[in-house]
Image (spheres, helix red, strand yellow):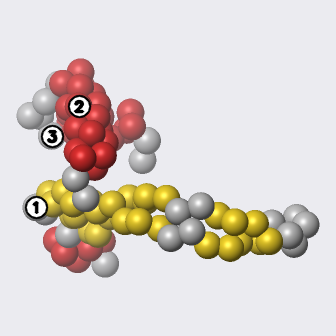
Amino acid sequence: MKKGEFVAAMSAHGALTRKDAEHFLTVFADTLRDSLQREARIALPGIGVFTVQERAARTGRNPATGQEIQIPAKKAVKFKTAKEIADAVA
């Protein structure tokens, strides 16, 4: 599902207009990004938990040449789905 389809689905529930649903989604994404930059964990009941994890530096391999390369350490976002959603999909 793409953003436009998701916005249409939100507005179809009747609580929000299409414009309000799109605004909500934009504000939600901006707030989520800003919060993850400051904090390591965001729990949204009924949706899931976002966490920031440190990935250690490691040695990788260039698939084209086979040459070893050093992959630097970085932070990555991890999402664990809430049980309610996981059960609904299963």
Return the mark for residue 27: 2
Residue 53 shown left or right of residue 87 in the figure: right
Q: Nearer the viewer, residue 86 or 14?
A: 86
Residue 66 visible, this orientation: yes
Identify the residue shown where x is 19% and y is 75%: 83
Q: Earlier in the sequence, mark 3 or mark 1?
A: 3
Q: Residues within 10 Å of mark 1 (few under 14, many from 20)?
A: few
Q: Helix, strand or loop at disc 1?
A: loop
Return the mark for residue 13: 3
Q: Earlier in the sequence, mark 3 or mark 2?
A: 3
Q: Earlier in the sequence, mark 1 or mark 2?
A: 2
Name the amino acid, label 2: Val
Q: Position of residue 10 (x, y in %)?
A: 22, 39
Return the mark for residue 30: none
Residue 89 shown left or right of residue 61 in the figure: left
Q: Helix, strand or loop at disc 2?
A: helix
CB-based contact (under 8 Å), mark 3 and mark 1? no
Q: Is residue 4 above or below residue 33?
A: above
Q: Position of residue 30 (x, y in %)?
A: 28, 35
